Image (tube, rainbow, N blue to C red):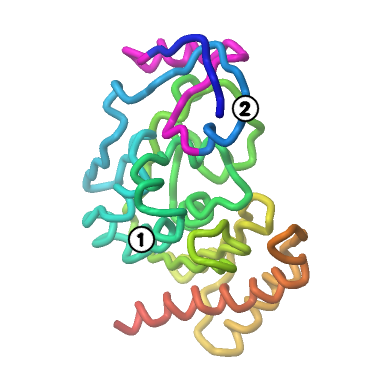
């Protein structure tokens, strides 16, 4: 369990950013993964007083604050009505409801875990992160950046008609995924995202397949192009085979939606 010398509930985002420039200070987020380490911090920075726990909808986009919990995303009707079951599928396997009531969107994305369900699915959408100092930038760019001392404040998700589907495979319920896969379509362009490789998620784009043969060719290209590693949950070759299966399932979900 971590320890700290002091706790500060930030009054402004600027205050939180300034405090976070000190190397041994840390933003708490939901604190769910922090409690697994044994570090001693100087100052814990709490963002819970900044109104960042709200999901806002405008005609053009959804704006999710960094303190929005995984459970909020899992159960939000507006997100479901716009994006189908994707937000539900990306969250429902993560540990348990008590954990998802604490874990935050900001903490999940800032950590950029290789096994992240959240990162995999959001990369399939058209998202931007809003940072306290650097402003807005595409999530795909942020996902590849090294860790820094900026603070992730919000996530903007464009409402542009993109449809998305999410698939994952776990050895047991609530475990960290062996592999994750998301697929989305906009203007006849298919985006495929593969995560838990066990490295960070990677994106690819293809023409949307109209035939069974074209879909199988895309799955084959994903298997051949993406690099997969081995760990205790599975070998690289096992993940490569899973990638073809999950990719096919995700694309099939999109094709079924199109028919409906």
Give the residue pinned by disc 2: 38
Residue 165 falls left or right of residue 37: left
**Do tag 2 and tag 1 residues touch (Cβ < 8 Å)?**
no
Q: In this view, does 51 lie above or below 126?
A: above
Question: Is residue 202 inside the magenta stretch?
Answer: no
User: What residue is at 47 percent from the left and 15 percent from the top?
Assistant: 17
What are the residue bounds of the magenta stretch?
Answer: 9-32
Residue 26 falls left or right of residue 49: right
Q: Is residue 125 above or below residue 12?
A: below
Residue 260 falls left or right of residue 146: left
Question: Is residue 16 inside the magenta stretch?
Answer: yes
Query: For residue 218, which quarter of the picture?
Result: bottom right
Mark 2, other Cα within 10 Å: few <14 / some 14–19 / many ≥20: few
Give the residue pinned by disc 1: 88
Q: Quadrant of the C terminus?
A: bottom left
User: What residue is at 62 percent from the left and 27 percent from the top?
Assistant: 38
x, y percentage for residue 33? 53, 38
x, y percentage for residue 48? 32, 25
Which of pointers 2 and 1 lies earlier in the amino acid sequence?
A: 2
Q: In this view, does 241 lie above or below 24?
A: below
Q: Please, what secondary structure does the residue beneath circle 1 have?
A: helix
Mark 1, other Cα within 10 Å: few <14 / some 14–19 / many ≥20: many
Q: Which mark is residue 133?
A: none
Judged by depth in the image, the label closer to the viewer, 2 or 1, is 2
x, y percentage for residue 127? 44, 46
Q: Please, what secondary structure does the residue beneath circle 2 have?
A: loop
- Looking at the image, which is closer to me, 130 or 113? 113
User: What residue is at 38 percent from the left and 66 percent from the top?
Assistant: 163
């Amino acid at each position: 369990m971590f320890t700290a010398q002091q706790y500060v509930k930030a009054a402004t985002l600027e205050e939180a950013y300034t405090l976070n420039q000190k190397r041994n200070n840390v933003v708490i987020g939901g604190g769910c993964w922090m409690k697994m380490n044994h570090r001693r911090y100087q100052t814990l920075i709490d963002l819970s007083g900044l109104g960042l726990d709200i999901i806002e909808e405008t005609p053009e986009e959804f704006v999710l604050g960094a303190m929005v919990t995984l459970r909020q995303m899992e159960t939000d009707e507006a997100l479901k009505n716009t994006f189908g079951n994707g937000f539900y599928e990306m969250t429902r396997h993560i540990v348990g409801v008590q954990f998802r009531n604490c874990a935050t969107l900001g903490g999940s994305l800032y950590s950029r875990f290789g096994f992240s369900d959240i990162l995999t699915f959001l990369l399939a959408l058209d998202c931007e992160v809003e940072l306290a100092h650097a402003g807005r930038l595409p999530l795909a760019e942020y996902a590849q950046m090294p860790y820094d001392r900026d603070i992730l404040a919000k996530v903007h998700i464009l409402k542009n008609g993109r449809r998305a589907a999410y698939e994952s495979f776990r050895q047991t319920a609530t475990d960290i995924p062996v592999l994750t896969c998301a697929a989305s379509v906009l203007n006849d362009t298919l985006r495929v995202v593969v995560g838990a490789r066990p490295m960070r998620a990677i994106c690819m784009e293809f023409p949307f397949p109209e035939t069974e043969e074209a879909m199988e060719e895309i799955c084959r290209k994903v298997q051949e192009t993406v690099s997969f590693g081995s760990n205790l949950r599975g070998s690289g070759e096992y993940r490569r085979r899973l990638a073809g299966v999950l990719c096919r399932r995700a694309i099939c979900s999109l094709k079924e939606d199109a028919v409906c």
